[in-house]
Image (cartoon, rainbow, N blue to C red):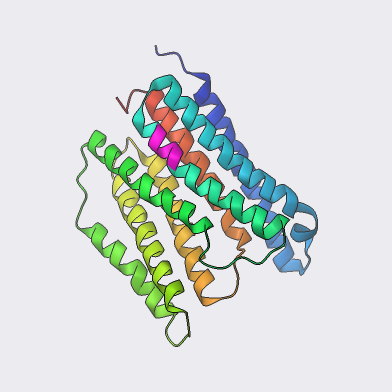
Amino acid sequence: MVREHPLQHVSLAMFACAIAASIGVGGTLLTDTLSGTTVFDEVLLDLHYFLMNGFFIVAVSLLFVGYYHYQRLVLLVAGLALSGWTLAHLYWTLYVYLASVPITYPSVADLGFQAFHLLILPTLLYLHRRADIRVRRSVVGVVIAAPLLLAVVTIGQTIPIGRFVYSLWYIILAAASLAIATNLLLSHRFRGIAIGVALFAVSDITYTTIAIVTPRLTVEFLDPVWYVSATLIAASLLRYEQEGRLQ
């Protein structure tokens, strides 16, 4: 019997904590909406951003420690993918929330958000090869559908061309991640990371659509999806390595 490495237990505990935190945040936001109160803004906002950034930092750290221990390149690439998004969100938190300074969209932070998809795509394709799964032609439809959705929801609105082009590019990236992750769901071997990346991509597509058609750049109800997805990605990859699926 293969002895489980402590990394696996820590990653699973981190994922369980992220689930618990997301339930707490979701319940508070729902209560505020139904009752017309602002409990979340007044009491939990500080804790919310602290936990969100903390979950991302721990997920990245576990993947890097996993790479150091197992010397598996896919763990390093996935860690770098989450690092890009983590650094971008830390910048966003310091800029918007702590400094209370309005941020433009797109901003420097979007370089890190893009990096996640640019690096998670080769990670997913590597897992496709390990599971001997072909990328189906239907994924092209998903990639095409996302920018078409953006075009439809922006009909009749005056949007700067630079913002629209960037949003289009980012949605195509996220849609590609969603399509490849959905294709990976056909494998029983790597469903955990496929679900994590798919949820992450859906959140990015949703946020980008909201950001381009409204003045809102803070969408709290999406935050739990991001950090639950990040912890799921890390926990899944470490589990796969422990079980020998990445070899």
Describe residue 140's horizontal placement relative to residue 123 as left or right: left
How far across and how far down the image is residue 15, in percent?
A: 55, 37
Residue farthest to the bottom? Answer: 156
Above or below residue 28? Residue 51 is: above
Describe residue 11's horizontal placement relative to residue 101 as left or right: left
How far across and how far down the image is residue 196, in percent?
A: 44, 46
Residue 27 makes an appearance in the image = yes
Residue 26 makes an appearance in the image = no
In magenta, the rendered stretch is 76-80
Residue farthest to the front? Answer: 108
Above or below residue 239? Residue 177 is: below
Residue at point 45% right, 52% down? 199
The one nearer the camera, 87 or 156, is: 87
How far across and how far down the image is residue 233, in percent?
A: 45, 40
How far across and how far down the image is residue 160, in percent?
A: 47, 79
The quarter of the picture where residue 35 lies is bottom right
The one nearer the camera, 221 or 34, is: 221
The one nearer the camera, 118 or 230, is: 118
Residue at point 20% right, 37% down? 132
* Residue 77 belongs to the span the image colors magenta: yes
The one nearer the camera, 127 or 77, is: 77
Residue at point 72% right, 62% down? 100
For the stretch drawn in magenta, the main secondary structure is helix
Describe residue 213's horizontal placement relative to residue 168 as left or right: right
Above or below residue 16? Residue 86 is: below
* Residue 121 belongs to the span the image colors magenta: no
